[in-house]
Every structure is written in structure tokens, then in C-alpha cells.
Image: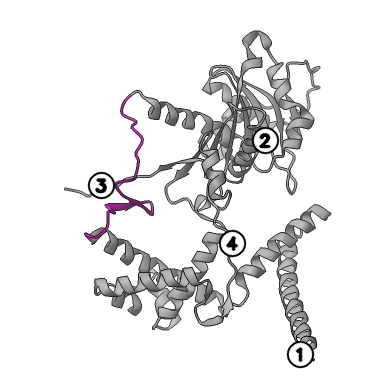
Amino acid sequence: MFFASLRSGHCSLLKVLRAYQDSWQNRCRFLFCCSTPSDRNRNSFADIARLLSDFFRDLDVVPSDVVVGLVLLRKFQKIERKAIVEQRKNDTYEFLSGVAVTPRTQFLSLHEDGADLNLFQTVIHYAHFAVLAYGWPIFVMMNKTGVCRLCTGLHCCCIPCRKHSETDPEIVDDNCCQCNYSVLKKLSDLGDIDVIYATYHVDVGETPFFVALDYDRKKIVISIRGTLSMKKIEQEQLIERARARKPERGTKDFEIVIVGHSLGAGTASILGILMRQIYPTLQCFCYSPPGGLLSAPAVEYTKEFTVSVVIGKDVVPRIGLHQMETLRTDLINAIKRSVDPKWKTITCSIICCGCSQPTSAVEMSTGETEVSEYMRSKHNARCMGIHPSDSSIALTSHQPLYPPGRIIHVVRHHPTSG
């Protein structure tokens, strides 16, 4: 009888969880109702729904609670960082773009002609490849005269096409005027660069990328906008085609560079790990890669050939399932400390409504003891992995994942006057 009731309770719980996941899946279908129905799309939506249902289940909060938690958490963070800098017991000098500067912080030496300067110039060079993978919209947005510059390289759809030669690049799924390929032609401004393949086919799990030859640096560059598989590289024989393009210029000895931005950076890193077994001299440059990407051992491995670039307080390299779970815990912890009505806390964050501080933030800023107590409670809540309001509820927890390779963090330093 006991096992029967236990089995019945377990089945009821599974039904509730399944219903909750189905509700999130229906929301995803509604948001992406214009997408093409396919098994791949349905599987992707199911994965997203599962993650969202795991993240939000057992949290008795409404949207206004989340807003209050974010407001308080930001206030608490400022107080905490100020206290850390003022304390003499630690080695934190200051915070730049949310990152603590300590004696262990390493800075690039860009004032002399050395390895650091050469690396940073290389990072800037390949950033252009990563950006141009987005096509003509980003080019027009970033250049005031972008439309005029774009028009000079367009293909007129009213004029019959000339016969393609073997040296012409293969362009897949561009528009009738080849606007995206016209943007890729601007790579010639960076040096002697030749595009050999570009695809602008967009689907779930399939997004644009292009392959180019950089003759000045003797590199084959693969620039990725989103997801790309090793299978695609092998099927199209892109590396072989690139090395056979102009053998008289030594292309058969060109090394491979993979670049990408945001999601493309994450894909570039994974592709680099797979391809490095075949091409050991491969390099990878990831711009604003996803934070929840690789395990700690994998990060150590990629440091040999991967450089990630993070700009300021960019959220993408800082976000992942583990980081979101930490944020969830900190939000609940902050909400628990609130003693004001929600409307008062929210208006404290609006300049036009006055610059008053929430009572909980005022109380915390009164002394070092209050800040230390907050930091201790926050640390305990993160370590326990249980609901702060109900210890019988275990919150979901995922393995910490990190951005790939060595990280260059570019920050803007505002020196104090005087």
C-alpha cells in the first residue's frame, strides 16, 4: 500500500511537471508562430521549454517581484563593491566593468612593439571578419554612408548574369542583388583578401558563414554567424577548395583561423576543438562568446589556440545556466530583505520619481557589519542550492560553464578628476 501511494504521488508530480513544461512549449510556439514547422524546430522549442520550466518552477514570484529584486540587487551590489574597495583586509583595488582589479590582474602592454600589441592588432583585424558575417544590415547600421557604399557593389537583377568562372566565389541564398556579398567585398579594404564561399541560408541550427583567403597573413578564415557543423565543412570540402584556389601563392600551406561573434563565437570555439585534431596550427578568435559554453578542463585546453574578447559589461559572456541560477538565488535573497512596498522600491530606481533609497539598502550601507552579514547570507544561499523560503525545495543546479580560451577584457577606464 505504501509503495502504491508513493508511486501514485510520483506519477502526479511528473504530470504536473510535464504540464508546466508543455505550457512553456506552447508559449515558445506562440512567440515563433511564423517559423516553419519541422521536427528540428519542435525539438528546439522542447529544449527551450524544458530549460525555462526547470528555471522557474517552485518560485512563487510575479513579474513585479522580479523587478523589485533586480532593483534591490543592483543597490546591494554597489554597496558591496564600495565596501570591498574600502576594506584593507583584501587586495581589491577597484572594479572595472564589474570585474575586480587585484595584484593578479594582468594588463596587455600596448605601448611598445611586442607580443601583446601584435596579438591585439590581430584581434582587431579579425573582428572585421566576424562583424561582416552579419551581412548588409549591420554594415548599413555601422556606417553613415553605408547605403551609398553598398550600392556601388550590387548586382543588378535586371541584367543577365555573366558566366561564372572557377575563380568566382560560391554564394548560397543571397538576395537577388547580392547585398550580403557586396558587403564581403569590403574586406578588400583590410588587405589582399579573397572570398571563396558564403552561405546566407537561415534555419534552426543553420545560419550564415563565409570562408575567405587572407593572403597578407597567409590564413584561411572561417567566419561564423551562428551554428556550423564539422559535417558541413567536410561535405563542401571548403578547406581543400581554399588551399587549391591559387596554389602559386602558397595557399596549400595557409593556416586556418576561425572567428565568430556571440553565438557564432561559441560555435567557432566548438568547431575549433573538433578541427584542431586535423589542423594542429589552427587559431580561434571569439568575440563576446556565450558564458555557459565549456567546462573548466575544456577551457584550459582551448587556451592553447583560442582568444576570447569581452567588451565592457557585455552580458553574453557572463550568462549561462549556472549564472542564471546564481542570479535567481540572489534575487530571492534580495526580495526577502525588502521591507518597503513594491511600488516604493520600484520608484526608487526612477530618476523622475526622486532619488530616495530603499530602506533595506539604507540599512545595509550604515556599517561594515551589515555588508558582511549580507555577503555571508548570499554565499550560504548559493552554496545550499535550496529555496531561501522553503528548505524542503531543492532548486535546479547545473555544472558551471565558462567562455573559451584566454580572455581579453576591454574596458573603458574613467579616471577620477584631480
What amino acid is labelled 3 in the image? Pro
Mark seen at residue 209: 2
Q: Main secondary structure of the magenta part?
A: loop
The kind of residue on which mark 1 rests is: Phe
Mark 2: secondary structure: strand
Query: Disc 4 vs disc 2: Cβ atoms closer than 8 Å?
Result: no
Name the residue located 73 percent from the left edge and 72 percent from the top edge: 23
Q: Which comes before the other along the chain, label 3 or label 2?
A: 2
246 left or right of 102? right
| Three-letter code for the amino acid on which mark 4 is drawn | His
What amino acid is at disc 2?
Answer: Phe
Residue, disc 4? 398
Secondary element at tag 3: loop
Q: Earlier in the sequence, mark 1 or mark 2?
A: 1
- Graded by Cα atoms within 10 Å as few (under 14), some (14 to 19) or many (20 or more), the crowding at tag 3 reads few
What's drawn in magenta, residue-wise?
88-112
- CB atoms of marks 4 and 3 within 8 Å: no
Does residue 210 show up? yes
Inspect this view and state whether residue 36 appears. no
The residues bearing labels 1 and 2 have C-alpha atoms spaced at a distance of 59 Å
Mark 1, residue position = 2
Tell me whether circle 3 and circle 1 mark residues in contact (CB < 8 Å). no
Q: Which residue is mark 3?
A: 415
Residue at 48% x, 75% y: name it.
Answer: 332
Crowd rating for badge 1 (residues with CA inside 10 Å; few <14, some 14–19, many 20+): few
- Quick one: label 4 or label 3, which is nearer the N terminus? 4
Q: Say if mark 1 contacts mark 4, CB within 8 Å.
A: no
Q: Position of residue 295 (x, y in %)?
A: 57, 50
Name the side, left or right, on which 285 lies relative to 87. Answer: right
